Image (spheres, rainbow, N blue to C red):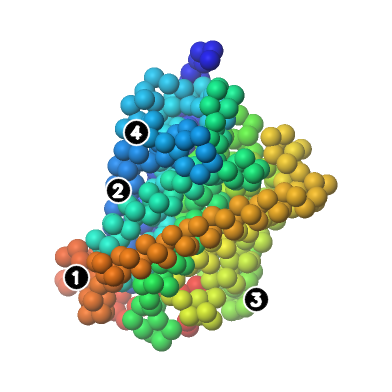
Amino acid sequence: MEAIEISAGDTAWVLTAAALVLLMTPAVAFFYGGMVRAKAVLNMMMMSFLALAIVTLLWVAFGYSLAFGDGGNGFIGDLSFAGLQPLVGEVAVNGGAYPIPALIFAMFQLMFAVITVALITGAIADRTKFLAWGIFAAVWATLVYFPVAHWVFDFGDAELGGSGAGWLTTLGVLDFAGGTAVHINAGAAALALVIVIGKRVGFGRAPMRPHSLPFVVLGASLLFFGWFGFNAGSALGAGQVAALAFTNTMVATAGGIIGWLLVERLRDGHATSLGAASGAVAALVAITPACAFVAPIGAIIIGLLAGVICAFAVTLKYRLGYDDSLDVVGVHLVGGVVGCLLIGFFATTEVNELGKDGLLYGGGAGLLGVQAVGALAVMAYSFAVTLILALVLKAVVGLRVSQDDEVSGIDLAVHAETAYELGESGGGGVFAGIGHHSHGGER
């Protein structure tokens, strides 16, 4: 292979983008932390930070290699990059060579692995054993995220004499930045996990409102900021594709905020800060797979539809009886499916010749069918493996803290800490009687 000179500009952008995506995990901690009751906010944040630590170590040991190693098949890589030392001094290769160091490509992809695991925590807030969560995070990343990342993100290196591209990429699924591998994957896992772990004490009876809406808005704002690295960084260079992904990320999010607030205003009579934050995140989820394949007008429509659809989807937990505490299913699973499928309508080679044309641009229904296969495959695999893993953990170590610890507060019971010192601060009445999060109708 001809030597490729490292591009300082592209490298600087991907370094920055990786740092932006890293910021998204603490952002999730604030976003979710604000939505739980005051007695559970530290545990909520700690689960994200534990995921960050565990997944990082596994990624270095073998995760990157399983996701991007050349296993000669479409389902899993190998251990050729274990420890990451083989990447030192090399350029990034994924369907071709890029003028950036291989190590920063590995670190950029690590941030996706971390946040995918962290996203699941919102579904099981208030009631999960910290040890059980740590074991789950390690095993789930190994059995689910690393293989699915290979399916979706590994384009192989056939041009350079290798093989082993992921089977969904070979099939032709378009997912620029992780609608399937990140959001559908995490959302399906969340659904399986809450089915096994059961409902919170008082779910459906006691009000469970956010304890800190400013935390929620702060978390959503940091997610929005970091998402430019998530989407535009996936171009792996500072060029036209990154510019398109950046633009579409911005305009879709604006559409999602408007869509969710319209639903709230028409359905409930008022628009809320929680709704604005949730609409932003729903749109960000939906535009993630599509950001480099659609025109800005298409991105606005995708964001608007995601805001509307997810605003209704979060109420399903009350009708169907599963306790997804912070609506990971309603926002990430549903939003990911919406974005993945709408590529089949709005994708156009007019903005990216490496993409395909969807139904609205004369491409027929073929792309829509392929996108549906990709979404369903990831959903089914993640749900099935998570269900089995959760049942095993429930039987072996238990998933839930005791009812007494849940009622009195998981922060104090598990971490021997409280988020707020209210004794002599004069703030004792601020949080008194405040319950947990509800997007959809516990008034």
| Residue linked to disc 3 | 266
Mark 3–mark 4 Cα distance, whole angstroms, equals 54 Å
Residue 413 - label: 1
* Secondary structure type for disc 1: helix
**Residue 98 x %, y %:** 53, 25
Q: Nearer the viewer, mark 3 or mark 4?
A: 4
The tag earlier along the polypeptide, 2 or 1, is 2
Residue 267 appears in the figure = yes
Q: Give residue 423's position: percent from left, percent from top.
A: 17, 72
Q: Find numbered disc 4 in the image and state the secondary structure of the residue it sits on.
A: loop
Q: Earlier in the sequence, mark 2 or mark 4?
A: 2
* Label 2 residue SS: helix
Label number found at residue 54: 2
Q: Mark 4 near mark 1, Cβ–Cβ under 8 Å?
A: no
Which of marks 2 and 3 precedes in the sequence?
2
| Among the two numbered marks 4 and 1 on one chain, the one whose residue lies closer to the N terminus | 4
- The residue under label 4 is 82
Crowding around mark 3 (Cα neighbors within 10 Å: few <14, some 14 to 19, many 20+) is few
Instruction: Say which residue appears at 23% left-offset and 76% top-offset.
Output: 402
Q: For the residue carrying disc 4, how many other residues have a C-alpha within 10 Å: few (<14), some (14-19), or many (20+)?
A: some
The amino acid sitting under disc 2 is Ile
User: In this picture, is 269 found above or below 114?
Assistant: below
The nearer-to-camera label among 3 and 1 is 1
Earlier in the chain: of badge 3 and badge 4, it is 4
* Residue type marked 3: Leu
Please tell me which residue lies in front, 223 or 212.
223
**Which dot, 3 or 2, sits closer to the camera?**
2
How far separated are the C-alphas under marks 2 and 1? 23 Å
| Residue 214 at least partly seen | no
Along the viewing direction, whichever of 5 and 440 lies nearer the viewer: 5
